[in-house]
Structures are given as C-alpha cells and as structure tokens.
Image (spheres, helix red, strand yellow):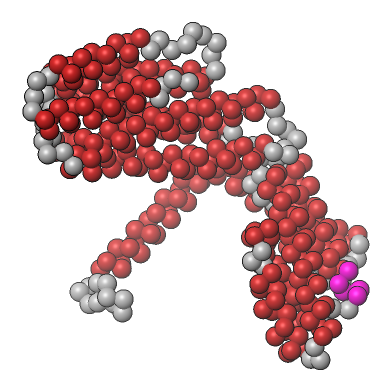
Amino acid sequence: MDKVGRGGKPLRMIWNAVRDGVADDLRGAWRFARDLPHTGTWAQETAAQALKAAIAAVLAWFVAAHVLTLPQPYLAPWAALAVVRPTVHWSILTGLRQMAAVGFGVLVAVLAVAVTPGKELALAVCVPIAFLVSYWPRLSDQGLYVPFTALFMVAVDSVEEPFVLVRLLETALGAGIGMAVNLLIKPPARVRTVGGRIRHDGAATADLLREIAATLREDADRDASRTWSARAKRLGDRATETRSALHHARDSLRLNPQTTQEQSDALDRFHTAFELNQRVGRCTRALADLLDGPGRAAMPDHSLDPAYRRDCATALDAATDAYEETLDRVLSHHDREPVDLGPADAALEALQRRTHATATDGPTTEMQATVLVAVRRLRSDLDF
C-alpha cells in the first residue's frame, strides 16, 4: 500500500478516494430510495420524469411506426425522450432547439453531398461545419444533434428528398409528443421545497449569530470560535444553491397549465425572504471575518472591552430576534402588525454609546468601532 501510482499519489490515497466516492454514491442511492415515497421531493419528481420519458418514447415510436408507418423511425422516440425536461418551459425550449438542430444537420448534410463527389469528402466537409454550428448558443445542449444528424445522414446515404422529409417529420413528431406528455401528465412545479430551503438557511444564519453573541457575552476562548468564518462561507455557498432552486421553481411555473395564483404568490414571498437572507448573510459573514477571519488579522489589537462585548452580544441577539420574526412573517404570509424593531434599535444605541464612551487605546477602539459598523449594518438590513 506504500507504492506510488503513475500520478504521484500513494495508492492508499487513491484507494481512500475511491472508497469515499463509492460510499457517497451508496448514501445518495439510499436517500433517493428513502425520499421516493414522499410528495414534493427531488427523488419523486425525478422518478416521475423517468416514467414520463418512457411514456413519451413509446408513444412516439407507436405513432411513427404503426400509425404513420415511417421507415426506421428512430428519431421520433429519441426526440421525445430528450424533450421531457424538469419544467414545461424548459421542455418547450428543448423541443424547439432540437428541431432547429436537426434541421441544421439535415441542411449541412444535403449541401455537403451536393458539392462533393464522394461520401468521404462529404463527411470531411459536413462534420467540421456541423460541429461549429452546434456551438451556437441558441441551440444550448441540443447543438449536439447538428453533427449527429449530418454525420448519420451522409453515412447511410439518406440525403435524398424522401429521407430528408421523413427525418424532419420524425423529429417534429417526437418533440411534439414529448412536449405534450410533459405538459399534460403531472407538469412539474418545484415551489413547495423552496420555502423549506429558505427557512433552513435563515435558521442556520440565526444560529451562527447567536453563537457569536454567546461567545462574546461569555468572553470565551478565541479558539472556540475559529469556525465562524468558515461556517459563514458555507452559508454563502448554500445560498447560491438556494438561488438556483428559486430560479428553477419560477421557471417551473412558466407555461405550466396547472399554475395557481397561490403558487405565484408563494414564490414572490420566497423571493422576498431569500433577499432578506442574502442581506443578513452578507452581514454575518462580514462580522465573522472580522472576529476570526481575514479582517481580524488586519487589527493590531484584537481585544474587546468586557462591557462592550456584553452590549455587542445584546445587540446581536436583539437583531437576530427581529430577523427570525421578520423571516417567519414573510414566509408565513400572516396578516399581522409589522415586526417590532424597537428592542434592536435600543440595543444598537446602547452599543453606540458604549463604543464612544470607552476610553481605551487606538487599536482597541478601532476594533470596537469596526464591529459596531458591522452590527449597525445588520440592523439596517432588517428594514424592508
């Protein structure tokens, strides 16, 4: 196990990486099986999409082969399968892009055969041209069908007029059936899980703020808080994932015939709550970086007056209380009085008085003033 592989890594490290990867895959498979029976989970939505893709492919093949009696209608189920996407809007865009890509592929194949004397030369001409066309951004991931279609049509000598029309018909048929299946059979609407993600993100941010406040109040050892900056960064990474989920949720309602006003209103609330989380998250990271991250290293003296620490902890707790109540009000959409920010304002004013009244040396005053700016920004970001 001490030998070294070709890449210079010990075999033990390679084995550990493979073992960890397999373990992650097995855990992922277990989570998928566990979540499959639960409505609204990613696992159930994925399974539903798989079944819809099978229905679309079989239906496209049946119509093409037995109703229209097209010869070797392989493109019909292929197109139907590719068009079944996680959202109706995405499905329609994919269908249109795929039909355009196949059309470009057919056009390139026909022109290449028309201007060259042999199959080899036709392939030499059509493949690079089709490959370049496939990178047109408008085609997105469907650009692959341009060189695939062109290469196949030249290779099997199917650039004559009947074959060209048949291939175009198959593609349009498959794409149309795929879009119809995705539109009519349980069209996906990914709204329900977004609210849970946003609430979880807010709870994690509030927990970090309360931990910072508790450590300041208890004047705990700095080694106990070395993970604040890293945790704040992870919260930012998770916020990026939540933003993507929010985008997919909004996209899932576009062109969806089962979209309700309640879903649209909920998505608007989720967007507002997400923006609140973003603002508070940025303030939290700035404060964490200042107390145990890069900002702390720039201060000559890291000490804070004990009375200042207590007032700072009180201000953080009051701001966190207001943040949690505001987030709950936005997500729950309850008709009630606005959140009372009076305690947070009073605690901030006490901290400001403490900062200006403390008679300490320059570096410590700089540290306290910088922390005050971070706490003041946290309070101001709670205003809508």
Count of marks, rendered view: 0
Q: Is 235 located above or below residue 80 in the figure?
A: above
Q: Which of these two is toward me, 19 or 222?
A: 222
Task: Please give the range of residues in magenta.
Answer: 161-165
Is residue 358 visible in the rendered image? The answer is yes
From the top left corner, tell me how far across and down residue 228 is, in percent: 25, 37
Q: Which of these two is toward me, 163 or 281?
A: 281
Is residue 61 visible in the rendered image? The answer is no
- The majority secondary structure of the magenta stretch comes to helix
From the top left corner, tell me how far across and down residue 240 is, in percent: 45, 43
Say whether residue 208 is magenta. Answer: no
Q: Quadrant of the N terminus?
A: bottom left
In the displayed orientation, state which residue is furthest to the bottom: 117
Quarter of the rendering containing residue 318 = top left
* Residue at position x 70%, y 85% in the image: 124
* Residue at position x 74%, y 49% in the image: 92
* Residue at position x 79%, y 91% in the image: 118
In the image, 220: left or right of 246? left
* Residue at position x 77%, y 88% in the image: 119
Q: Which of these two is toward me, 339 or 60?
A: 339
Q: Is 343 located above or below residue 143 in the figure?
A: above
Q: Which of these two is toward me, 383 or 149?
A: 383
Quarter of the rendering containing residue 333 = top right
In the displayed orientation, state which residue is furthest to the front: 362
From the top left corner, tell me how far across and down residue 222 is, in percent: 14, 35
Q: Is 276 located above or below residue 141 in the figure?
A: above
In the image, 185: left or right of 346? right
